Image (tube, rainbow, N blue to C red):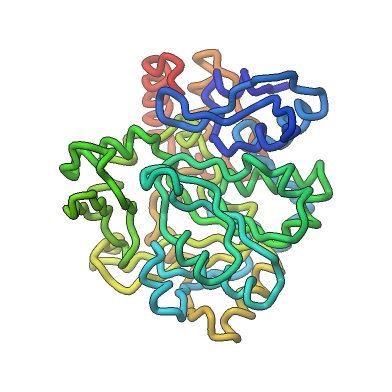
Amino acid sequence: MLDVAAITANGLCAGCGMCAGLSDPARPAIVMQNSPEGYRRPVVVGDVGAEQARLIDGACPGANIRHDPASHEAEYHPVWGPLITARLGWSADAELRRNASSGGGLSAMLVQLLNTGQIDYVVQTAVSDASPLRNALAISTGRDDVYRAAGSRYAPSSPLEDIAARLDAPGQFAFVGKPCDVAGLRQLARHDPRVDAKVPFMLAFMCAGVPSYRGTSALLTAMGVEDESAVTAFRFRGDGWPGFATAELADGRRFTMDYDTSWGTILNRHLQFRCKICPDGIGEFADIVCADGWHLDEAGRPLFDEQDGRSLVLTRTRKGEALVAEAVAAGTLLTAPVEVAAIARMQPFQANRKGLVISRLAAMALTGKRRPRFAGLALGHNARRLGAKENLRSLLGTLRRLVTAKGQY
């Protein structure tokens, strides 16, 4: 059995907060805190009962990413997971399209769900009221709430931190999270029937990993911000596509940095270890997943020039496909066709990352680390597709990382 201590000690924690969310709110056994390394991590503060321990072992997405093949409603693509239809899409609401990170495709579908009363509210992540540099759980009940929560938040979040209380509360909600968050909630549904009753829709966005809050600090320093406490507003991107990292200070000064530099050279150097062994950056457990539908240059590589935003929209379940069709019919979501073969050119990192997982798990085994349990993800197929040279490079790189990590996960 994998408990919280083993999960965190072996670098498996994704910081989703589900283990804490399963505690009795009146007498929590586990709470989430920011670690010295700048990640969200569980801390045991009371007695973890047998049932809570069983649920953590079986549903924690840090310890498990396991498909139930019988539950698939779509053909399983070895790279892109369960897939009904792939489209390009963007919000018909021009303001929402610009404010979102990737054209607002995901936001458009949330607005559709709220407008039609199919849900009572949305659980998602947004900027914290306590600090413009931190994330917090956000509850959206209408278009303006969705607008305020739109945009990427490249920093730790724990959207499942209150999940048991949320499942006990009145109303149905759509859940929006990172692929690991959605996988955890979907796996919890196998143990707790309240999840399917209370959460009719689970939506995800493709994720390349979670940077620590140290990454946020490094980004601000590189932008020229000398005093974080002077920042009154901050966004990682959006207000255009891909948009700029933007910090506004109390004295009126404004600092910006382009997306390719902020993510490509700073933030992605601060990813937690669990993201390095992630087999599901593409939201395989969601009803719908969205991502940047990058335009391509003449060589077929993603372009990061400022343009009108657009999302890749992949449907994975029948109700996800029905929601997209409904949003299109209502004029909330605008779409264009895309070939599945084009997704790998728009998202080259995601196209290859599953192929690196087996070699990195092997490195964990060689260093005596407990490994997560992955199943039904076509990892062997993807490893063979990348070839021996890439797998060896991945193995050696992970070994070096584990030897020098010194438990800082």
Visible residue check, residue 259: no
- Residue 174 place in picture, x, y as percent: 65, 60
> Up-down: is 109 above or below 205?
below
In this view, the residue farthest toward the front is 251
Visible residue check, residue 190: yes
> Up-down: is 359 above or below 181?
above
> Up-down: is 409 above or below 278?
above
Say which of 240 and 388 sits in front.
240
- Residue 24 place in picture, x, y as percent: 75, 33
Give left or right: position of 149 versus 132: right
What residue is rendered at 65% in x and 37% in y?
18
Give left or right: position of 399 versus 284: left
- Residue 151 place in picture, x, y as percent: 41, 59
What residue is rendered at 36% in x and 71% in y?
98
What residue is rendered at 68% in x and 37% in y?
21
What residue is rendered at 32% in x and 65% in y?
239
User: In the rendered view of the protein, which quadrant contains the N terminus?
Assistant: top right
Give left or right: position of 339 versus 201: left
- Residue 389 place in picture, x, y as percent: 38, 34
Q: Quadrant location of residue 120? A: bottom right
